[in-house]
Image (tube, grey):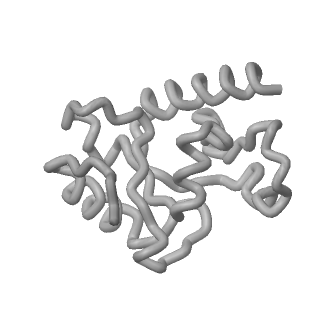
Amino acid sequence: MNWQKVRPVQGKFRDALFELYSRKCVLTKCSVREALEAAHVMPHNGNPVWDRPDNGLLLRRDLHTMFDAMLWSIDPKTNKVRLARRLVDKSYSFLADKVIDHQVDPDALLFRFIQFQKADEKNV
């Protein structure tokens, strides 16, 4: 049973990201549809304005969860993945400094990266 709240435009957002990112995770290039999720860069607050493709990334499910938990982010100056210092699971170290080709709005990416940095500082 799935208890997730479904938003009316959620399907369109997901479909748009699948199209935009050629049905592959932006980090790993995984193409298993069932393993992929549409992630919001600017957190969704119920306002459908955030369901734009330039506010999203197509991610493997585990990476989406970690993105939401502020365990990694994309540096807006370099487009490189930055991992949180508290991420002790070395199985994700292959992502460090990986350059990501994305279509995210620069302002949204900058906002998210600043939030990531604050969380990383706080959790050291």
Q: Measuring 76% from the left and 58% from the top, which residue is drawn there?
A: 92
Looking at the picture, how far across and down is residue 2, in whole percent? 33, 61
Residue 87 image-quadrant placement: top right
In this image, 33 relative to 70: left or right?
Answer: left
- Using residue 43 as the reference point, say whether residue 85 is left or right of it: right
Horizontal and vertical percent position of residue 106: 45, 33
* Residue 96: % across, % down: 77, 51
**30 sits left or right of 83 in the view:** left
> Which residue is outermost to the front?
1
Q: Position of residue 97 (x, y in %)?
A: 75, 49
Number of numbered discs overlaid on the protein picture: 0
**In which quadrant of the rendered image does the N terminus lie?**
bottom left
Q: Of residues 97 and 123, which is closer to you in this image?
A: 123
- In depth, the one of 107 and 91 nearer the eye is 91
* Outermost residue to the bottom: 32
Residue drawn 62% across and 37% down?
70
Q: Is residue 88 above or below residue 77?
A: below
Q: Is residue 38 above or below residue 45?
A: below
Which residue sits furthest left? 8
Residue at image x 52%, y 30%?
112
Q: Is 31 above or below relative to 108?
A: below
Could you tell whether 57 is left or right of 44 in the image? right
- Residue lying at 53% horizontally and 42% vertically, measured from the top left: 68
Give the quadrant of the C terminus: top right
